[in-house]
Amino acid sequence: MGWVYGTDKMWGDKCCPGHWSDGAQRCISCRRFIPRNERFLVLDAGRKACCRCFETLVVTHQDAQPVYQNVRRFFASQGMQLRQPPPVYVLDSSNMAGRSGDALRRCGVWSGVAAGLFQPVGVPTIRTVQYVQQTPHGPRVVYQHQQLGPQVVQARAIFLRYGMSRLQAGSVLAHEHMHACLQVGTRADQPLPIWMEEGMCQLAAYLYLEDLLDRGSLSQPGRTLCKVLMEGLRDETNPVYGGGFRAAHRAWTGMQWRGLSHMVAYMRQHGRFPT
């Protein structure tokens, strides 16, 4: 009797069906299974990146800047350019975990580490990732400490978990940048429902990826990864993130020709998605 293999519908890779549920190693970026004989990059918190992806990982502040510029360009094309965009800080998993708890719980997620956050800085010193060194005993993260002025401490910033691919980091930055856009012009005593705000942010991430696909500048692996990320947004089961996204996307299909800025203006005025 021959072996029975399963096939990844996106990447076309064949593997034993048992690996879908036995905890076999997957790349944190593309979600492919990592073959036993293949080199991989070890990140923190048990995360690993395959040899196809580690050249595209966002590890440092410098890595994140061109991605963030692309995200802001996309928002500007939608009529949503912020005069003072929030800064981006790239943190390791332990620092992100310390900031994630309340943000995730308000969305019905009781464990895990957020990929991105938009929240007050709150501390005078930020410890960001400078680079990651591979050693025989695992990864060694080298940090730099940034001293911040009083105005920065009181302001909000985007925090990004290091180790994502540029495409995934871009979608996360688009999500968090939409939080910043929604904050501008929204009264503190009339906030949007959490499922609506998160749904709108998920929609921004989805449309950013869709825009990259439509431009036709991605490599074939990049196009496939983009589709994998978009499918993850569409199929999210969490009622706040997934249900919010699907409601936002239904509303978007009826008014996309007007742009995201008009959709946000409608939400602020009526407190609901357009119908």
Image (tube, rainbow, N blue to C red):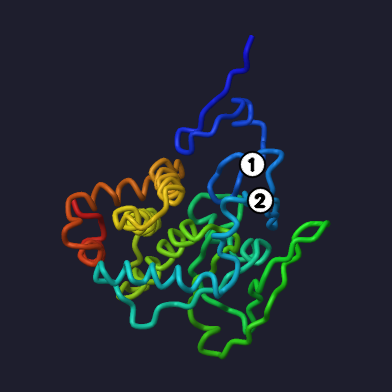
What quarter of the picture does the N terminus occupy?
Answer: top right
Tell me which corner region of the image, top left, top right, bottom left or bottom right, holds residue 9: top left
**x and y percent of residue 233 in the render?**
41, 47
Residue occupying the point 48% across, 68% down: 118
Residue 46 shows which numbered tag? none
Q: In the displayed image of the protein, which residue is found farthest to the top?
A: 1
Which quarter of the picture shows residue 211? bottom left
Residue underneath mark 1: 34
Badge 1 density bin: few <14, some 14–19, many ≥20, Cα 10 Å:
some
Q: Is residue 82 left or right of residue 2?
A: left
19 up-or-down from 271: above or below: above
Name the one closer to the observer, 270 or 252: 252
Q: Residue at position x 62%, y 51% from top? A: 51
Is 255 displayed left or right of 118 in the figure?
left
Nearer-the-camera pick, 262 or 212: 212
- 178 above or below 154? above
The residue that label 2 is drawn on is 48
Q: Residue at x 55, y 75 (%)?
A: 62
Badge 2, how many Cα within 10 Å: few under 14, some, many 20+? many
Image mark count: 2
Badge 2 marks a residue whose secondary structure is strand
Residue 123 visible in the picture? yes
- Closer-to-camera residue (34/89): 34
Residues tagged 2 and 1 counted as in contact (Cβ below 8 A): yes
Residue 153 location (% of width, % of height): 55, 83
Asked which secondary structure carries label 1, the reply is loop
Disc 2 marks a residue whose amino acid type is Lys
